[in-house]
Amino acid sequence: MAHFNYRGEAAPGLKKTARLHVGLPLGELLADAGSKAILEKRIGAYLNHPMIEAALDMSLEQIAPFAADVLTPELLQTINDDLAQV
């Protein structure tokens, strides 16, 4: 599966070998106490967005193009690294 940065060019994929990673559905990440704490720390204000329910079946990677100003490639990498430590 190809990953794209916000200029439409192929971007390197993020490691998804840990139990928790940015390729999992948001709802699954929010159901886990450890990953929920990470998401609240990194993107907490956005978890209360009125459209969050529509995004629960999407991964952060899938959501990123719709919120490119928030979910930058650098932040996705940071969140992914944090999740790998849970």
Image: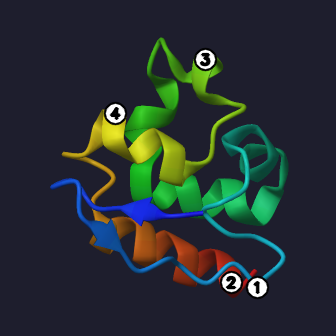
Do residues under tags 4 and 3 come within 8 Å of each other at their CB atoms? Answer: no
Going by the numbered disc 4, the residue's amino acid type is: Phe
Closer to the N terminus: mark 2 or mark 4? 4
Residue 10 position, x and y percent, is 32, 69
* C-alpha span from label 1 to label 2: 8 Å
Label 2 Cα neighbours within 10 Å, binned few <14 / some 14-19 / many ≥20 = some
Q: Secondary structure at mark 4?
A: helix
Per the image, the residue denoted by label 3 is 54
Label 4 Cα neighbours within 10 Å, binned few <14 / some 14-19 / many ≥20 = few
Up-down: is 73 above or below 58?
Answer: below
Q: Mark 1 or mark 2: which is in front?
A: 1
Closer to the N terminus: mark 3 or mark 1? 1
Residue 20 position, x and y percent, is 76, 70
Going by the numbered disc 1, the residue's amino acid type is: Thr
Q: Which quadrant of the view contains residue 3? A: bottom left
Per the image, the residue denoted by label 2 is 84
Q: Secondary structure at mark 2?
A: helix
Residue drawn at (72%, 32%) of the image: 57
Closer to the N terminus: mark 4 or mark 3? 3
Residue drawn at (67%, 69%) of the image: 21
Please state which of residues 53 and 9 is positioned toward the viewer in this rendering: 9
Q: Mark 2 or mark 4: which is in front?
A: 4
* C-alpha span from label 2 to label 4: 24 Å
Per the image, the residue denoted by label 1 is 17
